[in-house]
Amino acid sequence: MSEKESKVRLGEGISEGVKSKVNQEALGICNLLLERLFKYLEGKVQDIDFEKLFSKKDKEKIVSLWSSTLEEKGLLPKGYAGLPDNLLIDNMHQDGYMDGLYAGYALSMISLVDNNAPKELILSVRDEVRPNLFGHHYNDRNKFYNLYKSEKYSWVENSNKED
């Protein structure tokens, strides 16, 4: 080893030592601050009245804002903004149900025409079905299903074209 390499220089390593000491002290202070902050927050969280925080009125406001936002983005039909969640869900069920009924009605009418059913039959079916489309509610859908499954109508699903 040369003589230059074995000599210790004045101030050498001081900056690294200072940085290390500053980092250790800063870490200690940060740990102390975090301990105190979390003890403070723990005390505050225990004092929160969640029933008061999440009152029914607040819940209704949140749902109203939510439905208004969905309406603005075009994800809900016009007129649905501000509805409470139970009415919002009921109306969405009803809209989907009505869309399905109308699609079924349209398919039935198309099928009757395409199969050359007599005009009188087509008009009779139209006049019988159309009023039920608009006067029927999603929650009452089982009435239709049960009627269709009854003995009087069950043959429709159980018969073949050749029968």
Image: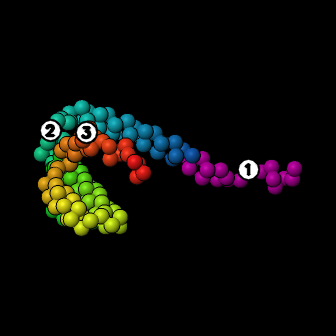
State the residue position of label 3: 150
Foreground pick, 163 / 91: 163
Whether tag 1 and tag 3 are in contact, CB under 8 A, the answer is no
Whether tag 3 and tag 2 are in contact, CB under 8 A, the answer is no
Give the x, y percent position of residue 11: 64, 53
Whether tag 2 and tag 1 are in contact, CB under 8 A, the answer is no
Foreground pick, 14 / 84: 84
Q: Is residue 25 magenta?
A: no
State the residue position of label 2: 52
Residue 68 visible from this viewpoint:
no
**Which image quadrant is residue 149 in?**
top left
Q: Which residues are magenta?
A: 1-19
State the residue position of label 1: 8
Residue 141 higher or lower than 96, as above or below: above
Q: Amino acid at mark 1?
A: Val
Q: Amino acid at mark 3?
A: Ser
Figure colour scheme: rainbow
